[in-house]
Structure formats: C-alpha cells, structure tokens
Amino acid sequence: MKVAIAADFAHFGHYRNSALHTITDNSLKAKFGVEYNSSQIPHFAVDKITDQAVLAQFAVDSKDIDLRRDAIGQLTDQKLLAKIAVEDKDAGVRCAAAKKLTDQVLLTTIALTDTDLNVKMTCITRIDNSTELNRTAARSKTPMRRFFRFTEM
C-alpha cells in the first residue's frame, strides 16, 4: 500500500514510474491508468494486466488515447469491442477496436457507416467473405466501389 501512496503522490514521473513497477494489484494499476494522463502513467501497466474487466476500464475510461488503444489490443470481449468500434469519438480508438472484431456483418456495417477512412479501410481488410465484400461495395455511397473492383482483380 505504501507503494501505491508513493505512486499517487509522486510529482516526478520517474518516482511515479518506479513505484508503479512494483505494484502487483491490478485494480491499483487500473486506477492510475484511468485517472492520469500519459505523462503520469507508463504504458507497461496495461501490458501486464490480464483481467478483462480492468482492461475494459482502461479501454473505455482512460484519458490517454494511446493507453486506451493498448488496452483494446488485449481485449477479447467482442460485444465491448463492437461498442467501442461503433460509438467511440476517437477514430484511432475505433480503428483499434475494429482490428479485433470478427463479426463480418458488423465489419460491413462499420465500413459503410463510419466517417473515418482509416476505420472504413480497417473494416474492409478484416472482411474475409467475398460475398460480404461485394455487398459492401454495392451499397457504398463512396469511392469504395472502385477500391473493391481493384481488389477483385
């Protein structure tokens, strides 16, 4: 517990990082990951966490976009990943979630409806069903039709 207090009150990043390296309680690591920005928490904390609930908390609540993406990279909950891929405000976070999705219909829907080209392209590359790809191209209101025709050659 003394380590957690030291990490919480350390004003210098070096001391905070040193204290955080010794914390073994995942809930404490989650607290620091959610409440502090990237200059205050090392990304190593996410890499060492295996508890899906804690990773979900990082992915949804952290103020640090990079930390959120790191957490998403370890999430396995398809429902939560789908929610993030569809609803998150940050396109990079949506893209990270889309990379983990397996639902072909959902990937198609996101490819058709997302406003960010990178998210669309991530979803397109994850669709492994040619029928679904053709359906996506046919329903697209964007230049994706040309992209699909090019990829079929």
Image: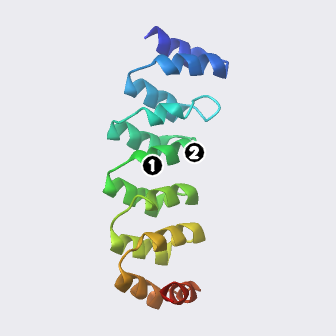
* Residue 51 percent location from the top left of the image: 33, 36
Find residue 143 and report its image quarter.
Answer: bottom right
Residue 90 shows in the view: no
Amino acid at the residue labelled 2 = Asp
Residue found at the far top of this picture: 2
Q: Secondary structure at mark 1?
A: helix
Residue depicted at 57% across the width and 46% down the height? 65
Q: Is residue 10 left or right of residue 113?
A: right
Between marks 1 and 2 in the image, the one whose residue lies nearer the viewer: 1
Q: Secondary structure at mark 2?
A: helix
Q: Which numbered disc flags the more N-terminal residue, 1 or 2?
A: 2
Q: In this orientation, which residue lies closer to the viewer: 20 or 141?
A: 20
* Residue 28 percent location from the top left of the image: 43, 24
Give above or below for 147 relative to 15. below
What residue would you read off at disc 2? 66
Q: Quadrant of the N terminus?
A: top left
- Mark 1 → mark 2, Cα distance in angstroms: 11 Å
Find residue 142 and report its image quarter.
Answer: bottom right
Residues under numbered marks 1 and 2 in contact, where contact means CB atoms less than 8 Å apart = no
What residue would you read off at disc 1? 73
Amino acid at the residue labelled 1 = Gly
Mark 1, residues whose alpha carbon is within 10 Å: few (<14), some, or many (≥20)? some
Give above or below for 131 relative to 20. below
* Residue 31 percent location from the top left of the image: 46, 29
Residue 138 shows in the view: yes
Residue depicted at 35% across the width and 36% down the height? 50
Give above or below for 5 relative to 119. above
* Residue 124 percent location from the top left of the image: 47, 74
Mark 2, residues whose alpha carbon is within 10 Å: few (<14), some, or many (≥20)? some
Residue found at the far right of this picture: 12
